[in-house]
């Protein structure tokens, strides 16, 4: 599989960046979470091909003020992205806030051939925001926390995010910090502040309409999202689901367990 290429197109005067690599059959579509970007998906794209955009507000895509950085706004961005590339069927992978793709998938379940959920924000009952998210959701406090985030603090904070001792990989942290500007900070704050816990449950009201095969992979030492939500996602979806709990992995489980990448590739490459 060739190394993924990079492309930026100006749409309505605003840049949209994505990575892509050739694929056969339904195209994999990878959606990153907070605070990262499509850099997360390079090793996945190398095995499966597909598309991985920088969502608006992140990475190299548009970060203009006044853009819609809500779940609904990202839902419609994904709809546009698929239409722009002629993606009638996709194999969808969502991680963290890439869960916005589940909002789109509930509106267009026939377009999703296979689904992978990895430590995704729960569009389910019973979730309570973690302490950092609670700080971001508070006016004034969130801005102070964002303003104090730098390479040193992000490295320290990341120590709890994985099971392997020490902070997350330098390459990942460098990518996050390179793009963690005021535009990204604004997008994160809006996304969290427009997503109270009661709304998260409502956002998953039609998960049962998604009837394609699903693989749910969960790093069980995730400090942000309890492992039980992997099983809750499986119960909420309408099709056959396999749940893979990883007791030795954290919020970005492929950093602790690189075999996650090949497991996803095998799932996407299964016939039928």
Image: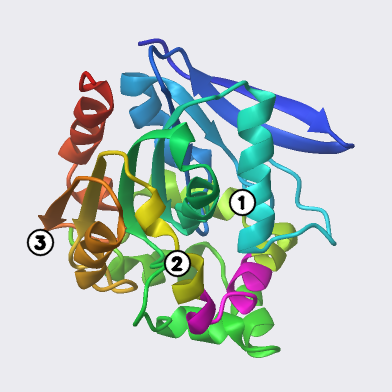
Q: Considering the whole magenta stretch, tell me its main secondary structure.
A: helix
Q: In this view, does 251 lie above or below 3?
A: below
Label 2: how many residues lie within 10 Å, few (<14), some (14-19) or many (20+)?
some
Asked if residue 162 can be seen in this view, the reply is no
Answer with mark 1 or mark 3, whichever residue precedes in sequence: 1
Give residue 247's mark. Answer: 3
Q: On the image, numbered disc 2 is attached to which residue?
A: 205
Give residue 267's mark. Answer: none
Q: Residue at x 22, y 51 (%)?
A: 217
Q: Which residue is drawn at 65% across and 59% down?
A: 72
The part of the chain drawn in magenta is 188-199
Locate the N terminus by quadrant.
Answer: top left
Q: Is residue 50 above or below residue 224?
A: above
Q: On the image, numbered disc 1 is attached to which residue?
A: 75
Q: Is residue 49 above or below residue 267?
A: above
Estimate the spatial distance between the alpha carbons at disc 2 and disc 3, rounded to whole Å. Answer: 29 Å
Nearest the camera: 4 or 119? 119
Nearest the camera: 206 or 193? 206
Answer with mark 2 or mark 3, whichever residue precedes in sequence: 2
Q: In which quarter of the image is residue 195?
A: bottom right
Label 3 SS: loop
């Amino acid at each position: 599989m060739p190394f993924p290429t990079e492309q930026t197109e100006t749409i309505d005067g605003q840049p949209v960046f994505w990575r892509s690599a050739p694929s056969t059959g339904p195209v994999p579509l990878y959606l990153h979470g907070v605070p990262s970007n499509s850099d997360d998906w390079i090793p996945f794209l190398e095995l499966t091909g597909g598309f991985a955009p920088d969502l608006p507000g992140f990475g190299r895509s548009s970060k203009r003020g006044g853009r819609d950085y809500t779940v609904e706004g990202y839902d419609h961005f994904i709809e546009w992205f698929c239409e722009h590339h002629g993606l009638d069927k996709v194999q969808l992978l969502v991680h963290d806030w890439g869960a916005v793709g589940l909002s789109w998938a509930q509106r267009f379940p026939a377009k999703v051939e296979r689904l992978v959920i990895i430590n995704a924000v729960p569009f389910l009952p019973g979730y309570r925001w973690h302490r950092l998210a609670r700080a971001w959701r508070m006016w004034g406090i969130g801005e102070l926390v964002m303003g104090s985030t730098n390479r040193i603090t992000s490295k320290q904070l990341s120590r709890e995010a994985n099971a392997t001792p020490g902070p997350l990989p330098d390459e990942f942290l460098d990518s996050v910090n390179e793009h963690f500007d005021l535009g990204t900070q604004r997008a994160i704050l809006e996304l969290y502040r427009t997503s109270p816990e009661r709304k998260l449950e409502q956002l998953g009201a039609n998960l049962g309409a998604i009837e394609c095969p699903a693989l749910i992979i969960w790093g069980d030492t995730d400090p942000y999202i309890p492992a039980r939500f992997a099983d809750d996602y499986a119960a909420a979806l309408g099709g056959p689901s396999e749940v893979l709990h990883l007791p030795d992995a954290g919020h970005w489980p492929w950093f602790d367990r690189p075999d996650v990448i090949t497991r996803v590739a095998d799932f996407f490459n299964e016939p039928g």
